[in-house]
Each structure stands twice: as structure tokens, then as C-alpha cells.
Image (tube, rainbow, N blue to C red):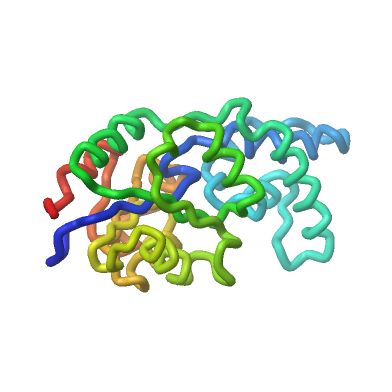
């Protein structure tokens, strides 16, 4: 992929490495049932799980971030999620094998997510998968969040790798926008939350993969 040999692979978190939709959806759905509203099935929440609180509250209450009541609802959602964020969250099938293969090739890897460190820290410390990650950049690590490229630049700095030698893998259009803006190779994770709902070819990523292990076929040796 691209003209430079790959030295590092960076990943989005939710919907790319981990399936956190059950816990995100349950945190939002608890807000409905606490108010006497009917519970919604996980299938309603899953496609928007990559959008975090914005997506979950949009499904649960049809609310947008510009509504005056959004901020207090978001904090209530965060508290609910914090109490259960490791209950049903799992690493996607094939991800552990992919990371093992990357490490065997001598490639560094890391995470760039819009999830705040409030949640990213406990998650990545609790899941053994992240023991070999050499960079973890949260949504509030820098003053910017994706689709701004600065979080990706920060990850490249942490790894000591030029951005042009990095590939960024994500399941949302803003991931691809951020990767392109940072000058990285971009891969759309079509197995993620949005893959089945949208035409990922419209994101103009350099490539798309239907399963994690397909990424290995795209990497140029260093």
C-alpha cells in the first residue's frame, strides 16, 4: 500500500478492534428504562456504536448534541457506561491473531480513538490485547479529535515513525478522513459497525477489509 514500506499500524478502537456495542447500547437503554420507556433491541444501537454518546443518545432519545439537554444526558450515559464497560465488550474475532502477526513481523502498533481517556485507560489496561500497543491516543489526549489529523500525528510521534510509514485502520468515515489528512495509508474496516450500513467505497480509503486478517495482505514489508 502506497510507496513507503509500512513500519506501524494504527487502529480505531470501537468497531475496529473491540465490539463494545453491547455495553454502549445497554448504558443508553438503561436511561430509557429508568424513565419508564420501552427497551430497544441492541440491533437499533449497534450501527451507531462508533459514534459514542452522540450515537447512543440519538438512538435512545432522538436527540442531537445541539439540544440544551444533551450535556446532562451525556454525563448520565457516561456514568452508566463506566459501571459496565467491560461486562460484554469483546475483541473482534481475528483481531488477536492479527496483532500477533504484526508483532511477529516487527511492526509497531497503536490505537487512536475519539473515546476519552476516562474510558480508554481502563479498557486498554484490562484487556490483554493491548499489552503490546506502543501508542494509545484518546479523544482528549490532544486538543483535537478525529477527523482532525493531530491525534494520528501524536501516535506517530509516540511510535517514532513518520506518518507516511503508518497505516490507519478504522470503521468510520472520519477515521479515513483523519488518516488521509495525516498522510497515512488508510484502510476501511468494513466488518465494523458502519460497514453493513454504508458504502465504504465512498470514503475513498486506500483499501477496505472484510475481516481483520485481510490487513496482512496489504502490508508492504519494511
Q: Picture coordinates of residue 59 (x, y %)?
A: 66, 46
Q: Indicate left or right for 213 with 58 as reference.
A: left
Q: Residue at x 36, y 63 (%)?
A: 156
Q: Residue at x 27, y 50 (%)?
A: 208
Q: How many marks?
A: 0
Instruction: Check the picture and name the quadrant holding the C terminus.
Output: bottom left
Quarter of the view holding residue 45: top right
Query: Eyeballing the image, is 96 above or below 177?
Result: above
Q: Residue at x 75, y 45 (%)?
A: 77
Q: Picture coordinates of residue 133 (x, y %)?
A: 40, 44
Q: Picture coordinates of residue 110 (x, y %)?
A: 39, 50
Q: Indicate left or right for 210 with 26 as reference.
A: left
Name of the residue lying farthest toward the right: 35
Q: Picture coordinates of residue 29 (x, y %)?
A: 73, 36
Quarter of the view holding residue 6: bottom left
Q: Indicate left or right for 33 with 96 as reference.
A: right
Q: Nearer the viewer, residue 99 or 38?
A: 99
Amino acid at each position: 500500500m502506497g510507496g513507503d514500506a509500512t513500519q506501524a499500524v494504527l487502529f480505531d478502537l470501537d468497531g475496529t478492534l473491540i465490539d463494545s456495542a453491547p455495553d454502549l447500547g445497554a448504558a443508553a437503554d438503561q436511561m430509557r428504562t429508568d424513565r419508564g420507556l420501552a427497551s430497544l433491541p441492541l440491533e437499533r444501537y449497534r450501527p451507531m456504536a462508533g459514534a459514542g454518546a452522540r450515537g447512543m443518545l440519538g438512538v435512545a432519545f432522538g436527540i442531537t448534541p445541539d439540544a440544551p439537554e444533551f450535556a446532562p444526558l451525556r454525563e448520565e450515559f457516561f456514568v452508566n457506561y463506566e459501571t459496565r464497560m467491560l461486562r460484554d465488550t469483546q475483541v473482534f474475532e481475528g483481531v488477536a491473531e492479527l496483532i500477533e502477526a504484526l508483532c511477529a513481523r516487527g511492526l509497531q502498533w497503536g490505537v487512536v480513538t475519539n473515546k476519552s481517556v476516562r474510558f480508554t485507560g481502563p479498557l486498554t489496561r484490562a484487556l490483554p490485547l493491548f499489552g503490546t500497543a506502543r501508542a494509545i491516543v484518546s479523544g482528549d489526549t490532544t486538543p483535537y479529535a478525529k477527523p482532525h489529523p493531530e491525534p494520528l500525528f501524536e501516535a506517530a510521534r509516540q511510535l517514532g515513525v513518520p506518518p507516511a510509514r503508518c497505516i490507519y485502520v478504522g470503521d468510520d468515515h472520519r477515521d479515513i478522513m483523519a488518516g488521509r489528512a495525516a498522510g497515512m495509508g488508510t484502510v476501511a474496516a468494513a466488518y465494523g459497525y458502519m460497514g453493513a450500513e454504508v458504502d465504504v467505497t465512498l470514503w475513498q480509503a486506500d483499501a477496505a477489509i472484510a475481516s481483520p486478517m485481510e490487513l496482512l495482505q496489504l502490508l508492504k514489508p519494511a
